[in-house]
């Protein structure tokens, strides 16, 4: 989704100078491939096969030509969010002790689960960024509609894309009005009450705007469904990618099953 990327990324993508062949695939195929990849990775249990899945996700990132710096920053942010849980997991899962810290003992089973969670999360998020994250939000909505996803979900996504900046501008106006009244945030009751008024006023104005938008859309004949203008078509490159993805997913499942039988 281009609006989630940094300005430099958007410029590069819009200009097409760094477009990889992965970005030229049918958006519906990219969504289906990302979903299947996530399901396959979640079902894996061996660390070796999970490491292979992470390598495959890194390969997708390179093919999508995602900028390494911002992408790794997002991955580091996600890993940081999970860090506390991952550090506690070896000490909370019972099993074979591998080392002790004071009265706490870490188990090999807990460490295995922690490493597996890290590999799964990074592989899935990296693949989603490569396959789905590089889609424009409007294209993503149209592709979901073509995949027969619920119309309400698609409309919610498209309306969010359209009006998130409008609500952001409304928020900026309210913050400017507060600063004009010499509001300075602090750790006191006045600040909390003022921020509560800010959120409440933002909700009220958003509701009023949504009613005006709905009235305008009904005047234009809106009957609860969008007319999709994008026409997607499968091409030979899509068939090649679909075959390669199916082979890779089947190989991951087979290797994981083989590893489980050997263990």
Image: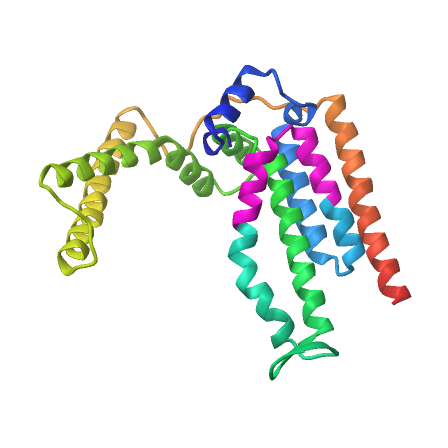
Residue at 43% x, 29% y is 226
Residue farthest front in this picture:
102
Asked if one can make out residue 224 in the rendered structure from this viewpoint, the answer is: no
- In screen coordinates, is 83 left or right of 151? right
Percent x, y of residue 163: 33, 33
Q: Position of residue 172 (x, y in %)?
A: 23, 35
Residue 238 lies in quadrant:
top right
Does residue 203 lie above or below 223 as drawn?
Answer: below
Q: Which of 50 and 219 is in front in this view?
A: 50
The answer to which image quadrant residue 35 occupies is top right
Q: Camera-side residue: 44 or 185?
A: 185
Q: In which quarter of the image is the C terminus?
A: bottom right
Compared across the picture, whether 127 is left or right of 134 comes to right
Range of the magenta residues?
Answer: 55-77
- Name, please, the residue furthest toward the left: 181
Query: What colouring style does the render use?
Result: rainbow
Quadrant position of residue 71: top right
What residue is rendered at 50% in x and 24% in y? 8
Based on the picture, tell me whether residue 63 belongs to the magenta stretch. Answer: yes
The rendered magenta stretch, by its main secondary structure, is classed as: helix
186 vs 108: above or below? above
The residue furthest bottom is 103
Residue 183 vs 98, above or below: the answer is above
Residue at image x 51%, y 28%? 136
Q: Where is residue 165 in the image (x, y as percent from the top left)?
A: 33, 32
Total marks placed: 0
Magenta highlight on residue 208: no
Q: Position of residue 42 (x, y in %)?
A: 68, 56
- Residue 49 seen in the current view: yes
């Amino acid at each position: 989704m281009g609006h989630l990327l940094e300005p430099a990324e958007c410029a590069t993508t819009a200009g097409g100078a760094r477009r990889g062949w992965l970005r030229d695939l049918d958006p519906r195929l990219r969504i289906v491939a990302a979903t299947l990849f996530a399901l396959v990775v979640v079902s894996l249990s061996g660390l070796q096969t999970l490491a292979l899945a992470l390598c495959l996700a890194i390969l997708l990132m390179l093919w999508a030509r995602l900028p390494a710096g911002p992408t790794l920053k997002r991955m580091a942010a996600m890993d940081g969010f999970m860090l506390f849980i991952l550090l506690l997991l070896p000490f909370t899962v019972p099993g074979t002790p591998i080392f002790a810290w004071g009265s706490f003992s870490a188990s090999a089973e807990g460490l295995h689960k922690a490493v597996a969670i890290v590999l799964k999360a990074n592989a899935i998020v990296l693949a989603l960024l490569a396959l789905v994250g590089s889609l424009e939000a409007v294209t993503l909505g149209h592709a979901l509609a073509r995949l027969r996803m619920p119309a309400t979900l698609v409309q919610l996504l498209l309306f969010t894309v359209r009006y998130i900046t409008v609500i952001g501008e409304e928020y900026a106006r309210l913050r400017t009005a507060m600063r004009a009244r010499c509001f300075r945030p602090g750790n006191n009751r006045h600040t909390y009450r003022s921020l509560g008024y800010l959120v409440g006023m933002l909700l009220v104005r958003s509701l009023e705007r949504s009613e005006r938008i709905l009235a305008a859309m009904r005047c234009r004949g809106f009957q609860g469904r969008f007319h999709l203008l994008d026409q997607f078509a499968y091409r030979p490159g899509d068939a090649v990618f679909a075959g390669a993805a199916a082979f890779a997913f089947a190989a991951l499942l087979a290797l994981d099953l083989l590893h489980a039988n050997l263990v």
